[in-house]
Image (spheres, rainbow, N blue to C red):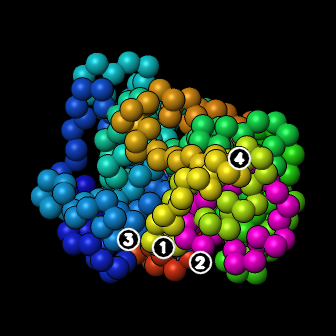
Amino acid sequence: MRAIGFDVNGGPAVLRPVELPVPVPGPGEVLVQVAYAGVGHGEVRHRLGDFGPPGAPGGIDVPGFEASGEVAALGPGVTGLAEGDPVAVYLPSGGGYAQYAVAPAALAFPLDGISLRDGGGTALTLTTAYGVLAGAARLTAGDTVLIHAAAGGVGSAAAQIARALGAAAVYGTVGSPAKAHYAKRFGYDAVHGRDTFADAVPEVDVVLDPVGGPTRLASLGILGPFGRLAVYGEAGRHPDIGLDIRQVREHNRALSGYDIADLARRAPALLRAHALAALSLLASGTIRLDITTQLSLSEAAEAHETLEAGRGMGKTLLRVE
Ligand SMILES: NC(=O)c1ccc[n+]([C@@H]2O[C@H](COP(=O)([O-])OP(=O)(O)OC[C@H]3O[C@@H](n4cnc5c(N)ncnc54)[C@H](OP(=O)(O)O)[C@@H]3O)[C@@H](O)[C@H]2O)c1
């Protein structure tokens, strides 16, 4: 099968077309014929080596943590799915930038009333947005929320999900005026600059932070009593802020973290519940996925270049023929 892989960590240029055998689903796994692969910041980190050097058999890693397609084969013991079913899959070890991918059946989510195209950007992106809000941040109706990287794949979904879960106000921050303009379509009450938000945003109950560094530190200062800072990424590639825990106690703050791979290992049923809840919001039209860029599989490096430079807006997909 055709795939995009890398055998050395580095810039977008290390991504190259490769020919690999079609993987065989093991017990509890499904083989999916990929139609669309989502492209997100996580794959940039995979390529750069944040999760270690390429370690897949043959020395070639295939990126791609989320994809959509039709079930092509079931591994031993899989029930509840059939060949031909349209699914979105979360792929904890990557593998989505390929004609076929193997996923744990527990992380294959039926696409009822959702197109394969939309489905391609859901299994990681929507699940994370929902999980950070409902799981890590314990959002409840009436809470006010600030979302950093507000125009990105996860951020743009999180704004809509927060509103669907009853948030009273949703604010965002972005890195450029063009993104501020773009983000307004997702229902933010206001969108501010990433470097100036601390003076502009009122105290909030919840902050979603995938950026880190100075953004993370400044976010602590705008939490109201018992406010929650939910940390789920390091897009800014800053050093750890080395927080003194007494600052948390002395200001009635709470810190929480979200990591989808850890959840997949330790609580796949919870991850699945978040995914299905988010997919049902998409199927009902309560939220939408804003696909701004669709490229072919062979153009994966171009997609990575845009995301790595922080220029991404909305969701980027690769069409896999
Ligand atoms: N924990 C998990 O399980 C999990 C799962 C999925 C994604 N994530 C994380 O969630 C974040 C969003 O992911 P996404 O796929 O939707 O991508 P994304 O939002 O398109 O990209 C990340 C955003 O981070 C901001 N950013 C700040 N400093 C940056 C820098 N130095 N370089 C690049 N971007 C920078 C940019 O937005 P602005 O310029 O507008 O600030 C950029 O658009 C990422 O940090 C990703 O790693 C975590």
Q: Secondary structure at mark 3?
A: helix
Q: Amino acid at mark 2?
A: Arg
Q: In this rendering, does residue 87 appear at all?
A: yes
- Which residues are the magenta region? 194-215
Q: In this rendering, does residue 70 appear at all?
A: no
Calculate the distance from the C-alpha at mark 2 to the C-alpha at mark 3. 20 Å
- Relative placement, left or right, of 263 versus 145 is left
Q: Secondary structure at mark 2?
A: loop
Q: Is residue 79 above or below residue 137?
A: above
Calculate the distance from the C-alpha at mark 1 to the C-alpha at mark 2. 18 Å
* Callout in the foreground (3, 4): 4
Instruction: Point out the quarter of the image occupied by ligand 1.
Output: bottom right
Of marks 3 and 4, which one's residue comes earlier in the chain? 4
Q: Of 226 and 295, which appears nearest the observer?
A: 226
What crowding class fits label 1: few (fewer than 14 Cα within 10 Å), some (14-19), or many (20 or more)? few
- Relative placement, left or right, of 155 versus 225 is left
Give percent across and percent down for residue 155. 65, 58
Q: Is mark 1 within 8 Å of ligand 1?
A: no
Using the rendered view, name the quadrant where residue 8 is placed: bottom left
The residue that disc 3 covers is 298
Of marks 1 and 2, which one's residue comes earlier in the chain? 1
Q: Of 235 and 75, which appears nearest the observer?
A: 235
Of marks 3 and 1, which one's residue comes earlier in the chain? 1
Q: Of 255 and 50, which appears nearest the observer?
A: 255
The residue that disc 4 covers is 252
The residue that disc 1 covers is 238
Residue at point 31%, 59% (across, down): 51
Q: Amino acid at mark 4?
A: Asn
Q: Is residue 125 above or below residue 277?
A: below
